[in-house]
Amino acid sequence: MNSETHSTTPPETLIIASRESRLAMWQAEHVQCALHKLYPRCDVKILGMTTRGDQILDRTLSKIGGKGLFVKELEVAFADGRADLAVHSLKDVPMQLPEGFTLSAILEREDPSDAFVSPHYESLAALPEGSIVGTSSLRREAMIRMRFPHLEVRPLRGNLDTRLGKLDRGDYAAIILASAGLKRLGLEARIRARLDSLESLPAAGQGALCIEIRADRPELAAWLAPLHDERTSLAVEAERAVSRALGGSCEVPLAAFAQWHGDSLHLRGIVSMPDGRRVLCAEERTRAPDMKAALELGRRVSIELEAQGAMEIVGALTTMSREDAPNAAPTGKQS
């Protein structure tokens, strides 16, 4: 049966694999609702799972295997038939998927900005010297250290509610989170300030949701096709092309963000050292791109960054991470 035939035969049952955090479940329920609207007679269920990325909370992601920890165990669920698809925040998805898996749909992007959250201060600039700022991202850490060297940056792990709880408990003067997650959970009022992309360039794919399936499920790809947003897809694939070319991972402060201006796509990329003392920037644009042109846009930006010495930074940080690896062995679930 070909994809066209499959697309005219509605599914009877679909199972979504999801992490059990409140935000991940919102994302799964968002797709569940969209599928119910497309296929009212389909029984769409959610399989909740806890991943190692959720369990190990006393170390940064760069020390325990990267954001792919949030994805791998969900892939196992639909590889062995327990689920049909998984919903991810695209910024958590590795640049290279394992063989046999594919992203079948990228949904329309939510607010891609970083958010400044604090109970007492209006902005990063308003924080007194020595204030503690929490973030889980080396990219955000580098941005803060570059612009506000008088502030202290400390790691912040856990789900969204856990992070906000640590802030409210007084462990941090402020924390930096993704605006999209706060908005999705109805917590937009917690945002004191949205950081402009010139202040804090977003991570590749930030604000976008994607759906991953097995590559040998063409009928499933056809059912999911109506959820795909082409303009978001072109933008985030240009961003991911930069990260892919430079070996982007949680070990490297790397940002890539593409914006539409009419029919023109403008892409900026940044690679930096975690202390913010060395920052490389590049930007390019293209008109009316198709996917080939979007990927070429990402390639051009990555070449500019390489010419400035990006691979020296990537190599140095990757070597440092490997040297730290023996001290980062998983110790099981943390309280």
Image (cartoon, rainbow, N blue to C red):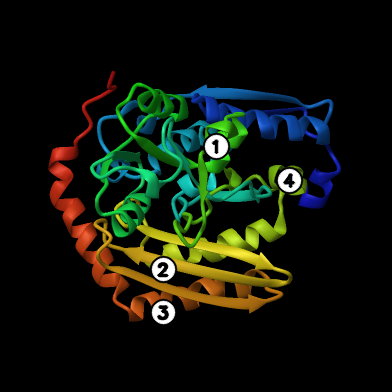
| Other residues around mark 2 within 10 Å, as few (<14) / some (14–19) / many (≥20) | some
Q: Which residue is most to the top?
A: 335
Q: Which residue is mark 3?
A: 304
User: Closer to us: mark 1 or mark 3?
Assistant: 1
In contact (CB < 8 Å): disc 2 and disc 4: no
In contact (CB < 8 Å): disc 2 and disc 1: no
- What's the distance in space between the residues labelled 3 and 4, CA to CA? 34 Å
| Other residues around mark 4 within 10 Å, as few (<14) / some (14–19) / many (≥20) | some
Vertical comparison of 330 with 94: above or below: above
Instruction: Give how far across and how far down residue 227 sits, in percent.
Output: 73, 45
Which callout, 1 or 3, points at the residue further toward the start of the chain? 1
Which callout, 2 or 4, points at the residue further toward the start of the chain? 4
Residue displayed at 61% across by 64% down: 259
Vertical comparison of 167 with 109: above or below: above
- What's the distance in space between the residues labelled 1 and 3, CA to CA? 32 Å
The secondary element bearing badge 1 is classed as helix
Which callout, 2 or 1, points at the residue further toward the start of the chain? 1
The mark found on residue 227 in the picture is 4
User: Closer to us: mark 4 or mark 1?
Assistant: 1
Which callout, 3 or 4, points at the residue further toward the start of the chain? 4
Instruction: Give how far across and how far down residue 281 sits, in percent.
Output: 40, 72
From where the camera sits, is residue 60 visible?
yes
**Residue type, mark 1 in image:** Gly
Q: Which residue is mark 1?
A: 181
- What's the distance in space between the residues labelled 2 and 1, CA to CA? 27 Å
Q: As drawn, is 45 to the left or to the right of 78?
A: right
Q: Which residue is mark 2?
A: 245
Residue displayed at 40% across by 44% down: 68
